[in-house]
Amino acid sequence: MSKRHTSTCFVRFDQDLCAGYGSCLRVCPTRAIRVKNKKAARIVEQCIGCGECIRSCREGAVTAATEGPGVLKKDHIAIALVSPVLYAQFPGVMPKDVLLGLRHMGFQHTIDMSYFLEMFQFATEEFISRNRKSQSAPWPLISPVCPVVVRLIAFQFPNLLPNVLPVLRPVALMAREVKSRLIPEYTENGEEVVLYYLNPCPTKKDSACLPSRKRPVRTEIALGINDIYPELVKHVDQIEAADDIPFYQTRFEYETCATANASMWGMSGGEIADMDIERSLAVSGMEETISYLEKIEMGLFQDIEYIEFRTCREGCLGGVLTAIDKYLAKGAVQKMIKRYGLGRRLHRENILRMYEKGEFQTEKKPSKLTSLFGAHKKALSLDSMQKIEKIMDLIKGTDCTACGAPDCRTFAEDVVRGESALKECLFVGAQTKKKA
Amino acid sequence: MSKFKKSFHIKGRDFIRAGEASISVQNLLKSMDFDPRLTRRIAICGYESEMNVVMHGGDGTLSIEVDTDRLILEVTDDGPGIDDIDLAMQAGFSTANDDHREMGFGAGMGLPNMKKNSDQIQVESKKNQETVVRMIFFVPEGEETH
C-alpha cells in the first residue's frame, strides 16, 4: 500500500485524489467516515465493506482493498473461485465459456460458486421446514449470503443475530471443498496454490489494517470483477470466435457450469426464486435493508419465514466492483432463463444426507459474530448522553457536514469522546467570533 | 448521577412515518451499553405504542427515560382516550376500524403485547381525555448504566 493511502479496512482512500467534498460521509451506513483538513478522508474501525463510499465518490479516490490482475503469476497454481455475477457481465455467453476464458487467461482451475449456492439452497429449505416444527430459531430468518448484511446486523442490529440463518454460507462450503479436496493434491507435491476470489464487492479486509499476526498468508487473494474484466473479455471473445474450443480437463462437477441460469443468483430475488418456501421476501438496497431490519426489530414480519437481503440495489449484479451496468446484466440473465429455462444440477437426496451428518452447521454463533463485526466503540455513559444533548442544543442541527462528521449527532458524540473539538462546528465557531 | 430523558413527536394518522419515534429511541439506546434482548423488548413496546397513537390518537409523544437501574418508556397522546382499560388490555379486543384492518393492523394485540414485553405497565386514561402509558424495564443487576 502506497503512502498516500490512509490505512483502512475494506476500502482505501487516496489522499491525493480526495477533494474533501464528503459525498462519502452521508452514504456510509455505519458513520465510519470523517473528513479532516478538507483533504484526507479518514475511516474509523467501523467499516462493514458495503462499498457505498466507492459508489459515491466522483473523484475515484475510494477504492476496494482488492488486488489488481497483475498478481496472477506463472509460478503457482491459480484457482479462481467465481461469483456467478461474473457470468452476467457477458450477455449471451454461456457460463461455461466464461469459465473457459478464465482458463485461457491462466487459471488452472475454475470453481463455480453457483454449485455451492444450490447446495445451500437445499440445506436452507430443509432447515426452514424443520424449524416450522421445532421453532428453534425466530421468524423471519435472515439470509446469511450477503456478508455485508451479516456485518451490518452484528454492528447495528445485534438483537437480530438469532434471526440469521444458521446454515454455512455458500462461500464457506466452496472454500471447504476446495481446501479439503483440490488443494492437497498440489501441496503434497510441494507446489504453491493461490486462491483468487472473483467478487462483485469489497469482501476482503486490507491486510495492512490487520495486526501482523492476523495477516493472511498470500494464498488467498481478492480480485474485483471490474479488475479482471478488461483482460478476461479478450479471452472470452477469442473462445467465442474459435472454431474448436480449447480443451481443459475438469475433474470435479463444480469446475464448470452447465446450467444457463447460474447467474440468476446475482439478481435480487435470485436466491429465493427457486426455493421451496412460500412466505419469503427479497429486499435489496442499503436504505431498504436498514428500514426492514428496523421493522423486524420492532416485531414486524414474524409471519414471514425467510428474507433475502442484499445491500446493493438489484442484488449482487449492482455490486460496486461489477463491470457492466446492473440493469444490462439483469436483462442478460432474464434472457438466459427465457432461452434455457431453470435447471438444477444437484440431487436433493444427496444434500439431505450431508445435512443429516451436520455438514451445513455453522460454527459462527451470535457471540462470535459480535466479536468479529460488532461495534467496538466504548458504550456511552448516562453522563456522556447528557453532554451530547447539551452540545446538540448549542449546535444548529442542520447536518451540514462542514465539520467533517456525517451528522450533528455523530459530531456531538465525537466531541464527548474527545475525538473532535466543539469549535470545529462552523456555527459554534461563528458565535464565538461574534462574542470576541 | 441524574437521569437522562428524551422525547420524540408522533404524528397521528401518519402511517407512512409511523415507527420513526421508536426507531429514534432505539438508536439512542444502542449507543449505550444495554443487553440487546432488553432493547428489543423496548423496540417492540415502542412500536406498539406508536401505532396506537397513529391509529386511534391525535398527536402524541414517545419518551424514554434512562436511569441507572431502569428505563421508562412513556407514550402520551391527546385523545380520544380509552373507555374501558381492563377490556383494552385483553388480547384480541380492538376498536380498530376497517381501514386499519385493511392495512394489517387492529388484531387487538397492542396493549397485551406491551404488557408482555415490559416489566411494569401503567395505563391512565378516560374517555375523551388524554392517554398516558408508562412502561418500566428493569436493567438486570450487574449491568447498571453509570
Image (cartoon, rainbow, N blue to C red):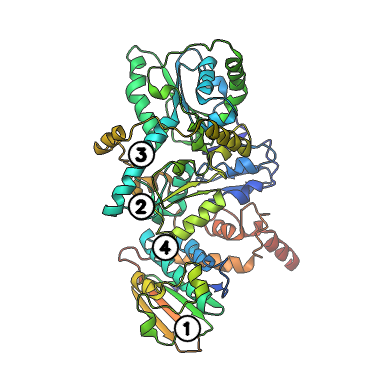
The percent position of residue A91, horizontal first and vertical second, equals: 60, 29
Viewer-nearest of labels 4 and 1?
A: 4
The residues bearing labels 2 and 1 have C-alpha atoms spaced at a distance of: 35 Å
**A389 vs B94, nearest the viewer:** B94
Badge 3 marks a residue whose secondary structure is helix
Residue A286 at x, y = what percent? 55, 49
Q: Is residue A65 something that shows in the picture?
A: no
Q: Is residue B43 above or below residue A147?
A: below
State the residue at coordinates (49%, 37%): A265
The answer to whether mark 2 and mark 1 are in CB contact below 8 A is no
Q: Which mark is residue B131?
A: 1
Question: How far across and how far down the image is residue A47, in percent?
Answer: 51, 44
Q: Is disc 4 in contact with disc 1, using a CB cutoff of under 8 Å?
A: no
Which residue type does callout 1 highlight?
A: Thr
Mark positioned earlier in the residue sequence (2 or 4): 2
| Chain under disc 1 | B
Residue visible at 68% across and 63% down in the picture: A428
* Horizontal relation, residue A433 to residue A94: left or right: right
The chain to which mark 2 is attached is A
- Label 3 amino acid? Phe
Callouts 4 and 1 in the same chain: no
Considering every residue shown, the one lying at the far left of the view is A357
Q: Helix, strand or loop at disc 4?
A: loop
Label 3: chain letter: A
Using the image as rendered, state which of residue B126 and residue A260 is in the foreground.
A260
Q: Which one is in front, A422 or A405?
A: A405
- Residue A85 left/right relative to A212: right
Find the distance from the CA under tag 4 to the CA under tag 1: 23 Å
Mark in the foreground, 1 or 3: 3
Of tags 3 and 2, the one toward the viewer is 3
Query: Closer to the N terminus: mark 4 or mark 3?
Result: 3
